[in-house]
Amino acid sequence: MSSQRATLVVPSRLRQLPYVRRWLQRVLRRWAVAADLIVDLSLAVTELCTNIIRHGYRGEEEGSIEICLCRDPDAVRITVRDSAPVFIPERVMPPPPEMLAEGGFGLFLIHVLVDDVLYERGNARGNCTTLVKYLPPTP
């Protein structure tokens, strides 16, 4: 099987998240990705895009988010690009457990849902995050 690709660009607005999720699920179903992996990837991408909108663009700055899907025989790779100020994941600490209901766990949830998270940052602006979910071997 050769690689399959799909790309979507949306404005950096929270109201775009349901559209992103539906698009992602539709493409992954068409590519015959297992339902449980689609759920994990949908949640991971939603969390990532939410963080970009709320913390990168701060919910006010105009910008866009580009989501590129790639399905290889062994993995699904989702690359998410933005032009928000640079994000440095090493500086993010998890909130205390008693604050669970108040959020702040998105980044850590993403790491649980996918197999690899790769960050690239621009100089002053721009981030590129790649989420990788390995597929079970086909018999």
Image (spheres, rainbow, N blue to C red):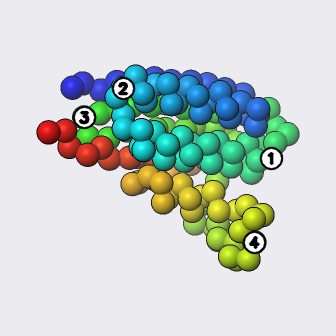
Residue picked out by circle 2: 31
Distance CA(mark 4)–CA(mark 1): 21 Å
Decide which of tag 3 and tag 4 comes sooner along the chain: 3
Asked if the residues shown at circle 2 and circle 3 are in contact, with their CB atoms under 8 angstroms apart, the answer is no
**What's the amino acid at mark 3?**
Pro
Q: Amino acid at mark 4?
A: Met
In the rendered structure, the answer to whether residue 130 lies left or right of residue 60 reads left
Mark 2 and mark 3: Cα distance apart in space = 11 Å
Q: Tell me the CA gap for discs 4 and 2.
A: 38 Å
Using the image, tell me which numbered label, if any, was put on residue 58: 1
109 up-or-down from 131: above or below: below
Residue 36 shown left or right of residue 129 in the figure: left
Mark 1 vs mark 3, foreground winner is: 3
Crowding at mark 3 (Cα within 10 Å: few <14, some 14-19, many 20+): some
Q: How many marks?
A: 4
What kind of residue is marked 2? Trp
